[in-house]
Image (tube, rainbow, N blue to C red):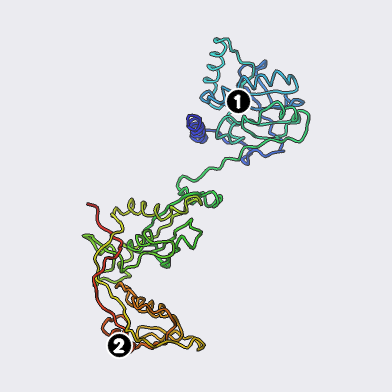
């Protein structure tokens, strides 16, 4: 954890200082195999001359070590770098470039000398040079060949005896270059920036918005998205909870949802209010994306987030509910000829089922009475022929039409599992 915090500090410090650095002639920055501009350093520590130009080092292989006195890993690497400088002698020149200014670097060198740990390596200070290489974190190492071409930009792990031997021998350099730093617009949400860079990098994200005008109301269940995403657009809060407490296939239906709130108008449209007005302040867009290893937890995560977002206490419970029970007389005989062509017609004025399973017929009755809980206890499992003419959202009208087929809907109290959404106590 300590090293992570240190790395973060290094990045932060350089991001903060970058605006103070003067511009250079080449704003495109460095590129591998590009000739490095001939920078001249006139602020030097521990060097034999008062000035040093990069062209003065032609014929040598150069490692530029961008470091800072605040950087513990940079300082820890100094003995290794000095040992490599000694091993390769005049073939190699390591040039340290301090990123936090002359005074701090000078004090560091003096302190080392007093502690009998005198620095062997020379150090230069040039903010244009730091700006040119777009240094955002240290330590960073730039590899220049004997002709001044940039061959690699790496971290300290790539500075090894074998890699330097290959470099000096002009063998194909097999090192891992540092990724080019990308500055993210601070005014842009992180999710938006990450999606622009590479959508595959987004492991976990959650977004909630108010009603978005012009966006079609829709819902993508996680079972239809590989279980890694829930996507709901312009839905009322009640439906968001029904999704979160549903199963692997469906949301909890309205007829199994109980609202215990002092403000029911937040969940459903009041009778004297138009939907087009109500939806503007009471529907939401919600998207949750989780990594593959969290698939089984996605609905639980959604439930926890909804509680954080809206504050309602939601849970599943068994409650006594007034339900409709569909039963059949013993002599039911409206069985279909299974060789006959199938036919299914349904609307608010009736249902025609020819050579379809009875369960399909019962399901159509439920479809038109979604505010009621209906239990099919007929025991009928075969294909049937039924032509029902009735007002399908009126229980009495449907019951009257069912008599012809020896079927009846009865009101009964039943213990039913429901989703309860209530205000926080």
Could you tell me residue 139's position as x and y percent?
58, 29
From the viewer's side, name the closer residue of 291 and 396.
Answer: 396
Quadrant of the rendered image containing residue 36:
top right
Which secondary structure lies at badge 1? strand
Lateral position of residue 397 relative to residue 158, left or right: left
Mark 1 neighbour density, 10 Å: few (under 14) some (14–19) many (20 or more): many
Q: In this view, does 90 lie above or below 144?
A: above
Mark 2 and mark 1: Cα distance apart in space: 94 Å
Q: Is residue 43 above or below residue 361?
A: above
- The disc at residue 360 is none
Number of numbered tags placed on the structure image: 2
Residue identified by numbered label 1: 97
Kindly identify the residue that appears in the image at 33 percent across and 61 percent down.
237
Q: Is residue 375 above or below residue 310?
A: below
Kindly identify the residue that appears in the image at 33 percent across and 82 percent down.
328
Nearest to viewer (mark 2 / mark 1): 2
Could you tell me residue 199's position as x and y percent?
54, 52
Could you tell me residue 238's position as x and y percent?
32, 62
Quadrant of the rendered image containing residue 122:
top right
From the viewer's side, name the closer residue of 24 and 1.
Answer: 1
Residue identified by numbered label 2: 403
């Amino acid at each position: 954890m300590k090293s992570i915090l240190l790395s973060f500090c290094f990045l932060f410090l350089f991001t903060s200082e970058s605006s103070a650095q003067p511009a250079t002639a080449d704003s495109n920055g460095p590129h591998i195999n590009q000739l490095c501009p001939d920078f001249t350093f006139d602020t030097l520590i521990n060097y034999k001359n008062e000035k040093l130009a990069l062209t003065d080092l032609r014929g040598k292989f150069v490692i530029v070590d961008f470091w800072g006195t605040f950087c513990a890993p940079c300082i820890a690497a100094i003995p290794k770098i000095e040992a490599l400088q000694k091993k390769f002698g005049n073939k190699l020149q390591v040039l340290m470039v301090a990123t936090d200014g002359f005074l701090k670097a000078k004090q560091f060198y003096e302190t080392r000398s007093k502690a009998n740990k005198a620095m062997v390596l020379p150090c230069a200070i040039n903010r244009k040079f730091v700006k040119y290489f777009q240094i955002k974190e240290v330590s960073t190492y730039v590899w220049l060949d004997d002709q001044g071409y940039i061959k690699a930009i790496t971290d300290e792990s790539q500075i090894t005896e074998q890699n330097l031997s290959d470099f000096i021998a002009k063998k194909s350099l097999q090192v891992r270059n540092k990724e080019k730093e990308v500055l993210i617009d601070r005014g842009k949400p992180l999710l938006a920036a990450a999606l622009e860079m590479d959508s595959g990098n987004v492991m976990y994200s959650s977004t909630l918005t108010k009603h978005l005008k012009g966006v079609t109301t829709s819902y993508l269940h996680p079972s239809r998205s590989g279980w890694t995403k829930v996507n709901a657009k312009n839905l009322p809060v009640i439906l968001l909870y029904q999704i979160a407490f549903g199963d692997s296939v469906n949301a909890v239906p309205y007829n199994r949802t109980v609202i215990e709130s002092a403000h029911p108008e937040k969940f459903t449209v009041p009778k004297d209010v138009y939907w087009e007005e109500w939806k503007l302040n009471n529907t939401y867009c919600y998207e949750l994306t989780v990594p593959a290893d969290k698939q089984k937890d996605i609905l639980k995560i959604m439930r926890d987030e909804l509680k954080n977002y809206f504050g309602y206490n939601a849970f599943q419970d068994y409650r006594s509910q007034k339900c409709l029970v569909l039963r059949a007389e013993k002599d039911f005989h409206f069985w279909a000829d299974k060789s006959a062509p199938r036919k299914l017609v349904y609307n608010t004025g009736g249902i025609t089922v020819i050579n379809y399973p009875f369960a399909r017929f019962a399901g159509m009755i439920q479809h038109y009475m979604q505010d009621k809980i209906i239990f099919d206890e007929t025991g009928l499992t075969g294909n049937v022929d039924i032509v029902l003419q009735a007002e399908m959202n009126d229980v009495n009208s449907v019951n009257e039409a069912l008599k012809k087929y020896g079927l009846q809907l009865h009101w009964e109290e039943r213990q039913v599992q429901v989703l309860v959404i209530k205000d926080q106590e």
